[in-house]
Amino acid sequence: MASPDRHPKRRRRLTPAPPPLHSLADELLFLVLDRVAAADLKSFALASRSCHAAESRHRRRLRPLRAALLPAALARYPAAATLDLSLCPRVPDAALAAVSSSGSSLRAVDLSRSTGFGAPGLAALAGACPDLANLDLSNGVDLGDAAAAEVARMRRLRRLSLSRCKAITDMGLGCVAVGCSDLRDLSLKWCLGLTDLGIHLLALKCKKLASLDLSYTMITKESLPAIMKLQNLQVLTLVGCVGIDDDALGCLEKECSKSLQVLDMSHCQNVTHVGVSSIVKSTPNLLELNLSYCCPVTPSMVSSFHRIAKLQTLKLEGCKLIPGGLKAIGTSCVSIKELNLSKCSGVTDMELSFAVSRLKNLLKLDITCCRNITNVSLAAITSSCTSLVSLKMESCSRVSSESLRLIGKCCPQLEELDLTDTDLDDEGLKALGACSKLSSLKIGICLKISDEGLTHIGKSCPELRDIDLYRSGGISDEGVTQIAQGCPMLEAINLSYCTEITDSSLTALSKCTKLNTLEIRGCPRVSSSGLSEIATGCRLLSKLDIKKCFEINDVGMLYLSQFSHSLRQINLSYCSVTDIGLLSLSSICGLQNMTIVHLAGISPNGLIAALMVCGGLTKVKLNSAFKSMMPPHMLKNVEARGCVFQWIDKPYKVEMEPCDVWKQQSQAVLVR
């Protein structure tokens, strides 16, 4: 007899097979897809029919590259709620009519950068999207009252932008007011055809308005009482309204708006401190007040701010501070968290020091171009405002490098810092290493910093997303590499005129996969080799400035055309690109803005071919010499697609001044 097997085989436990994709509830599946990167969704959709169907049901936002793709996109994604047409320079009425077959789920449509449509297209949109709540028609300079009448059929609109729709009159606005009575947010900026009559009707019919922008309109004091009676109005923007003066604001003393929280009267040139004092009496619950470029800031005006005890944001950019005005801010505005004194004249050490010593809640301070302040002011700021999250002090040239070190030592909560054109040195950057939350750092034209200082930033600021090193001549590959390695979240970097950097810097930056903005203008040592690394590694790149990068040629353009499908804006002037490179670049469907003022390697025929191929262009800067070489009918065809040509007449100039010479020249101009 055969002996029994001493070691019988163990039975394998079979793990149950995962359920098929189509058996998962949409809620669970969509939670998974929410965590899938946008670039990987296409791959997911191609995996199987179930994946394809799931991705179709999941997509909520559409952003087609061309209006011709709209019918197919809507059919492919029937559940889409947002339609963004900002990449389509021209959207004809026929394209909007295509929405009627499958656009009933749309809740928001953005046509702010599109032309070519009118009342018929908006009529089709209104009929197809009964639940549309958000519509952006900004820059519709050709849209008139007929178009407004079609908008009025969209009864459920909550947000509407008609900015720069200059042809709309009171009649058109009246239609909108009657038809869209549920509006909460309305922008009428630069609607020059409107008068007080239209605004009166708007205030009468749209009682639920919470935000209203009337900037650069022709309204007068006749409109303000009706506006101030809107019981839900929280944000009122009156930028550049020349018809608003002290008399208009004085009429409001009997009208009290308890709901208004944000008031912007910047650039209202006919308003003085008297009018400001009047409006303050009428808005007791104001949280934000913007008086930039409006009127001199007097102590009596600021003293009236005690009536708005809840004020948190005060913006006075470009205003003249009368002696005692800034000191009064410290006394009357003790609750403010944000103070903007950018480009203000009259800011002194004594008054600024007093003000910040009283503003214990201050989180954001802007003292850009306050050229008279010294170390005294910075010592007061850093000792009194240790919780600052934003500090901007560009061109504060009288503050020494030793004092700038106090920023890092005393303000560890900083997230945004602008020290452009200051005396900052490497020790200052070392001190900034304590600001581990820093996300934006602007240190351009700081001639004392070097790779050593950048090394400290790279090691200590992992959350950095934006760094500006413009004309910082002491920077080389080593410093840029430290930033690239230590700041994986980097989204934007400006290395313009950092003449020592080479392709090694671009290779290091290519590992920053979230990089979307790269400015390397005037960096003559970088080449197509480095740019190819950027193209393959930084797939989100949307803005690129390579002007005066003489070693970048057609090879770099070929890599961009193959990998940089997100590219929207590029400056090619003075590069070594020829017709071949330009034509390959024009194959990027989403490319909108090109600057090619001086490009010796291209011919009129090559330029014509590129412009005809690149269908998404909205703006092109060209040397005026090309205008006479291009057929007029070709220019008209390109312009008919929504592209605007800007003809530049500048002499060809290759030489670049060293950073220190350039800084001396710019300061001399400012002194004059």
Image: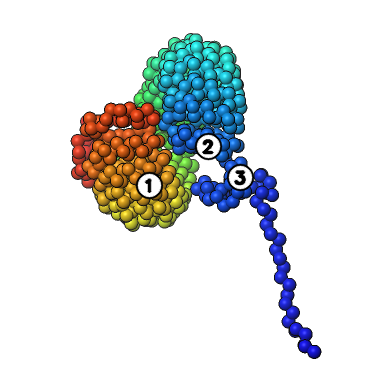
Amino acid type, label 2: Ala
Chain-order first, disc 2 or disc 3: 3
Amino acid type, label 1: Ser
Asked whether 572 or 303 is in front, the reply is: 572
Q: Which quadrant, please, contains the N terminus?
A: bottom right
Q: Residues within 10 Å of mark 2 (few under 14, many from 20)?
A: few
Calculate the distance from the C-alpha at mark 2 to the C-alpha at mark 1.
24 Å
In the displayed structure, would residue 18 be above or below residue 307? below
- Identified at 41% across, 40% down, the residue is 589
Chain-order first, disc 2 or disc 1: 2
Name the quadrant containing residue 26.
top right
Whether residue 463 is visible: yes
Amino acid type, label 3: Ala
Helix, strand or loop status at disc 2:
helix
Q: Which quadrant, please, contains the C terminus?
A: top left
Asked whether 521 or 607 is in front, the reply is: 607
Calculate the distance from the C-alpha at mark 2 to the C-alpha at mark 3.
15 Å
**Do the residues under discs 2 and 3 have CB atoms within 8 angstroms?**
no
Helix, strand or loop status at disc 3:
helix
- Identified at 41% across, 53% down, the residue is 537
Q: Which residue is mark 3?
A: 53
Residue 464: horizontal and vertical position, in percent?
A: 44, 48
Q: Which residue is mark 2?
A: 72
Name the quadrant containing residue 597.
top left
